[in-house]
Image (cartoon, rainbow, N blue to C red):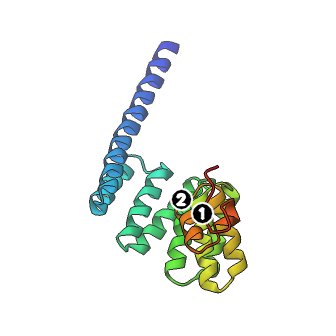
Amino acid sequence: MAFTHALHDNREMKKKTDKTNNSLSWLKQGTELQENGDMEGAIAAYTKAIRIDPDLAGLYVMRGYACTKTGRFRQAMRDANKATRLDPEMTEPYFIRGVLYGERGKYKEAIAEFTTSLKLDPKYAKVYSMRAMIYTMKGEGVLALLDYQMAALLGDKRTQEFLRRQGIGWLVGGTESGSMSKN
């Protein structure tokens, strides 16, 4: 009896492993397509992965991100919401929703989403940078500057370059002329 139970458990484990391997194969393909700029192909691959393993939050994040790049904002929001329901501790869905709200001019909601993302991962430089842009659009320069500074200190190269071009690279250890230090 114990042998039969163990054999059944082993078969179930193999099914789960096969399912995960298949969904990860589609995830890999989607990621490659996305890196090559084929967002439509990436969305299709992520959708196939989701059909195989609908409980994997990261798949919805990847498809949601690709959807933002193709202007499918409703689908991106649905995917971000689903990912949050599956894994509320994952930072990326909040980031995606922040971007989507920002695109729609809903700055208060965008800031709230970015702030939630940062509570989950306080070293997520890109989120500081995006929140800084929203603060800038709202005319909240001091808060924007603080977030730009944090993004740069955390190593965000685009933000470092932005601060250097603005002549304020010294905020994160550069010289008075705005060049960033190599530390």
Look at mark 1 in the image and give the residue it sits on: 179
Instruction: Name the spot of residue 179 as percent of width and height, x first.
Output: 60, 63
Which of discs 1 and 2 lies nearer the camera? The answer is 1
Task: Indicate left or right for 31 with 119 as reference.
Answer: left
In this view of the protein, which residue sits in the foreground, 151 or 98?
Answer: 151
Task: Indicate left or right for 76 with 134 as reference.
Answer: left
In this view of the protein, which residue sits in the foreground, 150 or 127?
Answer: 150
Can residue 115 be seen in this snapshot?
no
Q: Residue at x 44, y 68 (%)?
A: 76
Q: Quadrant of residue 124?
A: bottom right
Task: Indicate left or right for 42 with 115 as reference.
Answer: left
Q: Amino acid at mark 2?
A: Lys
Q: Residue at x 28, y 63 (%)?
A: 40
Task: Indicate left or right for 144 with 67 as reference.
Answer: right
Q: Secondary structure at mark 2?
A: helix
Q: Tag on residue 56? A: none
Instruction: Name the spot of residue 77 as percent of width and height, x first.
Output: 48, 70
Label 1 crowd bin: few (<14), some (14–19), many (20+), radius 10 Å = some
Label 1 or label 2, whichever comes before in sequence order: 2
- The span from disc 1 to disc 2 (Cα, nearest Å) is 13 Å
Look at mark 2 in the image and give the residue it sits on: 157
